[in-house]
Image (cartoon, rainbow, N blue to C red):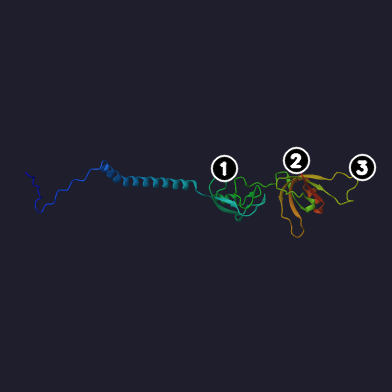
Amino acid sequence: MSKTAVSPAAGQLPAQPAPPQIPGATAGFRARRRRPGMYALAIALIAAGGSGGFLAFQATGERTPVLAVAHAVQAGDVIKDADLIEAQVQLDLALKPVLAADRDKVVGKRAAVALTPGSLLTQGQATTRTLVKAGERLVGIGLKASQMPATRLSPGDKVLVVATPAEGQTAAGEGGKQPEPVQIAARIVKVGEKQATTGDTVVDVAVPSQFGPTLAAQAATGDVALVVDAPGGS
C-alpha cells in the first residue's frame, strides 16, 4: 500500500522553517545599543577636561599692568610722567615691579639709578633723597675727552679731581721739584651729554663742603682732570 502525500490546504502556504539561532547575537545587539551612551559620556568627560585646561590657562596667563621705562632717565633726575609707560606682564613678585596703579607715587621722585628704556620699573629705583649728602657740595666740571677716562663714568663712581695747571704756573718746590698736584676726592653724581658744539662733557661731582669753593675755582680755569679711584677708595 503506497503512502499518499498530504497537500496543503487550498490557499495556505507551506510552513517556513524557523531561522537558526546564532549564539551571542542578542547580547551583541544589546551591547551595540549601549554604545551611544558610552560615546556621550566620553564626550562629556573630554569637554570637562577641556574646560578645566582653559580655566587653568586663564589662571596662569593672567596679565597685570605695571610700569616700564619709556625714556632714559639719568640717576638723580626727576622722573616725569612721560618717562613711564604701562605694560601688561605676568606678575612675578620676585622682580618687585611697580604697579601701574602706583604711578602717582613714582612721578616726581628722583631716579636712584639710571633708568633704561624698555626695562620694567622696580621698587627702589625711585627715591625722594637727593644724591648729594649732608656735608657735601655739588660742583659741575666741564671736561674735554683728554681730561677724563674713556671708560664710561656712572653715578656713584669714586674719582679724584686733579689740578693740572699750565706749564710755568706752578712754582718749583724745594730742590727745584714740582709739588704734588692738588687732588680732591669726589663722587660722580651725574654725567651730562657731550656738547655738540664744544665736545665738552659736564660731570657733576659731590665733594666735602670745605673743598667746594676750591674745586669750583679750579674747574672754571679748565685745568683739571678726572682720575677714577679704585673700588673702596684705595
Tag 2 secondary structure? helix
First in sequence: mark 2 or mark 1? Answer: 1
Q: Amino acid at mark 2?
A: Gly
Q: Residues within 10 Å of mark 3 (few under 14, many from 20)?
A: few
Give the labeled residue for mark 2. Answer: 233
Tag 3 secondary structure? helix
Q: Whole-percent x and y of residue 63?
A: 51, 49
Q: Residue at x 27, y 41 (%)?
A: 24
The answer to whether mark 2 and mark 1 are in CB contact below 8 A is no
- Report the mark closest to the observer, 2 or 1: 1
Residue lying at the far front in this picture: please name it: 1
The answer to whether mark 1 and mark 3 are in CB contact below 8 A is no
- Per the model, the C-alpha gap separating discs 1 and 3 is 62 Å
Judge left or right: residue 73 versus residue 65. right
Q: Amino acid at mark 1?
A: Ala
Q: Whole-percent x and y of residue 108?
A: 62, 52
Front residue of 17/105: it is 17
Which of the image's four quarters has the N terminus?
A: top left
Judge left or right: residue 114 versus residue 176. left
Q: Whole-percent x and y of residue 164?
A: 83, 49
Q: Amino acid at mark 3?
A: Glu
Q: Residue at x 80, y 49 (%)?
A: 225
Tag 1 secondary structure? helix
Give the labeled residue for mark 1. Answer: 94
Give the labeled residue for mark 3. Answer: 174
Front residue of 73/92: it is 92
First in sequence: mark 3 or mark 2? Answer: 3
